[in-house]
Amino acid sequence: MALFGRSDKQGSGKPGEWYYCLDHAKVEEGPQCPSKNRMGPYATRVEAEHAMDRAAERNREWENDERWGDGGRPEEQ
């Protein structure tokens, strides 16, 4: 018996929510894969289909953010 939380391997999620599964590189409806292996939830299938594009865009924004200096730490204000 698990001491904390649920013992199932899927994690939380609800049918009607869309996820991008990192293991299978595909969109899934509802909690099909463990939560550690998916991005989301997204409101629509289309949003989930573009999860990796959005993550790459956010990474580029972060890498080019002037508030971050050498070594990945915020500069003193």
Image (tube, rainbow, N blue to C red):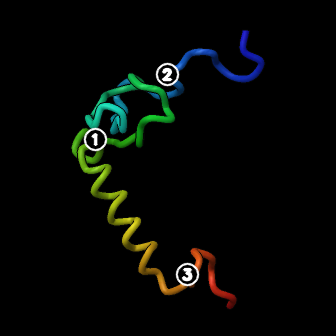
Instruction: Give me the residue at 63% from left, 15% from top.
Output: 7
In the rendered image, the residue lying farthest to the front is: 71
Where 66 sits versus 32, above or below? below
User: Could you tell me if the residues under marks 2 and 3 are in contact, i.e. CB atoms within 8 Å?
Assistant: no
Res. 46 image quadrant: top left
Q: Nearer the viewer, mark 1 or mark 2?
A: 2
Q: Residue furthest right?
A: 3
Residue under pointer 1: 44
Q: Is residue 32 left or right of residue 49?
A: right
Q: Earlier in the sequence, mark 1 or mark 2?
A: 2
Considering the numbered disc 2 on the image, is that residue within a helix, a strand or a loop? loop
Q: In the figure, 8 relative to 29: above or below?
A: above
Determine the residue positioned at 26% across, 35% down. Answer: 26
Q: Is residue 57 above or below residue 55?
A: below
Specify the quadrant that holds the C terminus. Answer: bottom right
Badge 1 vs badge 3, beta-carbon distance below 8 Å: no
Residue located at (38% from left, 22% from top): 32
Label 1 vs label 2: CA separation? 20 Å
The mark nearer the N terminus, 2 or 3, is: 2
Residue type of the residue flagged with mark 3: Trp
Label 2 is placed on what type of residue?
Gln
Q: Quadrant of the N terminus?
A: top right
Q: CA distance from mark 1 to mark 3?
A: 33 Å
> In the rendered image, which residue does mark 3 sit on?
68
Q: Which mark is residue 10?
A: 2
Residue 60 placement (x, y as % from top left): 37, 71
Q: Does 18 sit left or right of 3 as displayed?
A: left
Q: Residue furthest bottom?
A: 77
At a point 32% along the width and 58% down the height, the residue shown is: 54
Mark 1 vs mark 3, foreground winner is 3
- Front residue of this view, candidates 30 and 62: 62
- Farthest-out residue, top: 1
